[in-house]
Amino acid sequence: MAGGTKSFLADAGYGEQELDANSALMELDKGLRSGKLGEQCEAVVRFPRLFQKYPFPILINSAFLKLADVFRVGNNFLRLCVLKVTQQSEKHLEKILNVDEFVKRVFSVIHSNDPVARAITLRMLGSMASIIPERKNAHHSIRQSLDSHDNVEVEAAIFAAANFSAQSKDFAAGICNKISEMIQGLATPVDLKLKLIPILQHMHHDASLASSSRQLLQQLVTSYPSTKMVIVTLHTFTLLAASSLVDIPKQVQLLLQYLKNDPRKAVKRLAIQDLKLLANKTPHTWSRENIQALCESALHTPYDSLKLGMLSVLSTLSGTIAIKQYFSSVPGTATTTARSFDLVKLAQECCYHNNRGIAAHGVRILTNITVSCQEKDLLPLEQDAVFGLESLLILCSQDDSPGAQATLKITLTCMVKLVKCRPHLSQSVVESLLTQLHSAQDAARILMCHCLAAIAMQLPVLADGMLGDLMELYKVIGHSATDKKQELLVSLATVIFVSSQTALSSEIKTVIKQQLENASNGWTAYRIARQASRMGNHDMARELYQSLLTQVASEHFYFWLNSLKEFSHAEQCLTGLQEDNYSSALSCIAEALKSYHKGIASLTAASTPLNPLSFQCGFVKLRIDLLQAFSQLICTCNSLKTSPPPAIATTIAMTSGNDLQRCGRISNQARMKLSMEEFRNLATRYGDLYQSSFDADSATLRNVELQQQSCLLISHAIEALILDPESASFQEYSSNGTAHIESEYERRMMSVFNHVLEEVESLNRKYAPVSYLATCLCSAVIALLKVPLSFQRYFFQKLQSTSIKLALSPSPRNPAEPIAVQNNQQLALKVEGVVQHGSKPGLFRKIQSVCLNVSSVLQSKSGQDYKIPLDSMTNEMEQRVEPHNDYFSTQFLLNFVILGTHNITVESSVIDSNGIVWKTGPKTTIFVKSLEDPYSQQVRLQQQQGQPPSQQQQQRTAYSRF
């Protein structure tokens, strides 16, 4: 998670030194107080950077109040700058604590005689609508300004009215009639009407308001038939329907009617654009008749641009439930079934169209129909889809223009989708791709390689057949150092790694290395090595990392590459394992561990405070511990075989009721039990690593899950074969989820899992001798180790970055200093937090809510040493909060009855949209010192001195003091 702070710290801005929040704010305040307009403006425009860097309410409140002062007393240019800052920092507005004071300072300008100042104030109020939706004085000012004679002020009032209508139901209901009168009034100019109409899209707060707005828009469409009015009105109509939901079917019919009957191309284009919006938002509301009408319009239109638009709507619908509704047979409508295939007829006609975009949508529709509809009369469409895809592939692979590349991407995506659902079509698809690879442009070759890799991952049967063609192509790529050539070298190498199911042959390695020496730069070689590590070709990866060691400029990079080289060497050592030779297996594991220990030392040296490589270190440490556990298990099994239990061990076990007696010696029993517990502990640690990797891609998470499952499998095998055969259950370990296997590594691991489970289950029924069971365990370990480990993407590359920053109040000036609290009072601990994202927020998963866990532990007592109930010594609380605009806050009430120093720990974890909890951190600690309240202290001192407390003091309580 800490990786996400890299860009956050890098954006300190304008080359100034790192300052704390107060110093940075004082620096900008100095600029605001300057007598020079330029310095004031510069200070104002630097506020968004300050908000980004210190996004907590206490600073944002102070900053916005200062900006409001500038707005109140400054000139119009400064006001405009403040307006822009407010609009840029919209998500921080809700952190303003003194909203009343902020609005009061801004609102005072509305009474200015200058219409431009009033206009800027109205826009400012509109930008703040999310925090003041129900302010009546703002509502009143907007209404008044709509009647102004100054155009600038009226436009500003329209902007503010639109923003307040979106936020406030009362304002929307009140302004609706006013807007209606202005739109229908003869005195209102047409250009103003065009700006007023879009306000009606926000009238969706209740059904009656939405209905009256629809009626008004219906009147406008018929009363004002000019092109601009129809376009604006129809679009507003669509947005209103999309928000209110109930009128979507009517709106689809209306748009189709305009598409069919209105002769103006601009109106038809608008209708298509809005139909696309509704197809994306609510495809389930489209009836069979709607799709049929759209097909007929597309078949009859002579204009390619309109046909392209209609096909894009149909291709969107074809990937949803709407396509099944279209092809489902409706009883009593036998006459329409023949015409219901207009969509198929249209798609077949468009597949070979001279316009690439139309052809792409045609093949996409055919592919989606083939994939989602299993009816027998639609099966012949498979071949049509394949032929269409192949012709489009030939057309686009010869052209390197951006349009051709976009079309090629659509084509290749359809190919992967088709092959996944119809594996029997894969052979012809792969052959056509390999044929085109030789003559295609470099940009097209790269995309085609990605497609081939995706197909080979899904269907490994096809992979071997590709290898020959791919190697020929790799030899003749050419020796230019252009970016496309470098990209092509990486893409082709990836397909070769995917295609060669077993270890790479020496011939393939020689060809790849030769090409890299001739034509590549260091970055290309590193990317190919990275792909080799992901595909389990560790010998190739090791050689490439070794060659790159001397080509990097930073020692951190050197240590990183050195660690990767050592890890690859370690995994390469494990490829020499043999099924029945357990002594050589132990030496191979020892050699691998030696390299892993060297690698982890290098990896630790490669980490920096901004990039601590926590996932990589955690993953490698677990791998080391797993290999040590495997080695220990093989030794224990060997011990069982060299000193097997006596022949009557089974009888002794049955009579004594202790199954461990079957293992013979006490040492063997203890070691087996220890081994099982160690594997369970490793599985738990893999689970913790999984939970801490919120930003990891799904393939990496699946990899961690497989490691965890292998630990559970071995611990289960030990229990089922040796420790407790009677109670072992096989139900929870049955193979599930094999239908969604994504990679060759997962496929091989699942195959080993199933084989081991079958072996264990069959031996469990036979009551075989313990030495034979030990052999079975060793074989299981070697089978797992023989599958080459895959280092997945998150090990090398972080595509999503998310971090949480917490602020606690009260907080001490010095972190080691405790906060003083009286023991008869409760501490109100406020926890605020900000979620920070990298460049691609929510790429793999999004934060739904944040779970805050607060616990306190008594560290040292300062009072009398009597027995204390356990619940008085600790606080344990948990709350879930949903971040809004990446900000959250909540409070906890904590008791500190026991005198002494308490350690409070606040730990955050996140819950994603699927309800899964991720232990992302951070963890923050503060100290609290619980002090005796003065009255109790006085009474205690008097008792110690032997004086009875006076009558007045006896009656006095904690409440009566106030």
Image: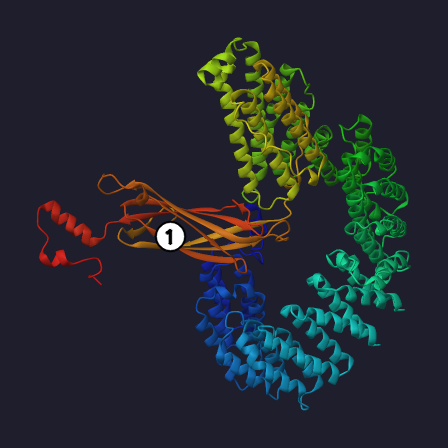
Q: How many numbered discs?
A: 1
**Residue 162 is at least partly visible in this image:** no
Task: Give the crowd class for mark 1: few <14, some 14-19, many >=20 residues within 10 Å.
Answer: few
Vertical comparison of 941 with 758: above or below: below
Query: x, y (%) of residue 636?
Result: 54, 17
Q: The C terminus lies in which quarter of the figure?
A: bottom left
**Residue 710 is at least partly visible in this image:** yes
* Residue drawn at x 64%, y 32% as measured from the top left: 562
In this view, the residue in front, 602 or 246, is 246
Query: x, y (%) of residue 563?
Result: 62, 32
Query: x, y (%) of residue 296?
Result: 85, 67
Q: Give the colouring mode of the picture.
A: rainbow
In this view, the residue in front, 401 or 865, is 865
Q: Which quadrant of the view contains residue 291?
A: bottom right
* Mark 1, residue position: 813
Q: Amino acid at mark 1?
A: Arg
Query: x, y (%) of residue 832?
Result: 45, 56
* Residue drawn at x 55%, y 13% as measured from the top left: 640
Task: Looking at this view, name the residue that lies furthest to the front.
Answer: 332
In this view, the residue in front, 99 or 646, is 646
Describe residue 611's horizontal placement relative to residue 190 as left or right: left
Q: Which quadrant of the view contains residue 764?
A: top right
Q: Which quadrant of the view contains residue 326?
A: bottom right
- Looking at the rendered structure, the secondary structure element under dot 1 is loop
Task: Looking at this view, name the residue that lies furthest to the bottom.
Answer: 187
In this view, the residue in front, 357 or 210, is 210
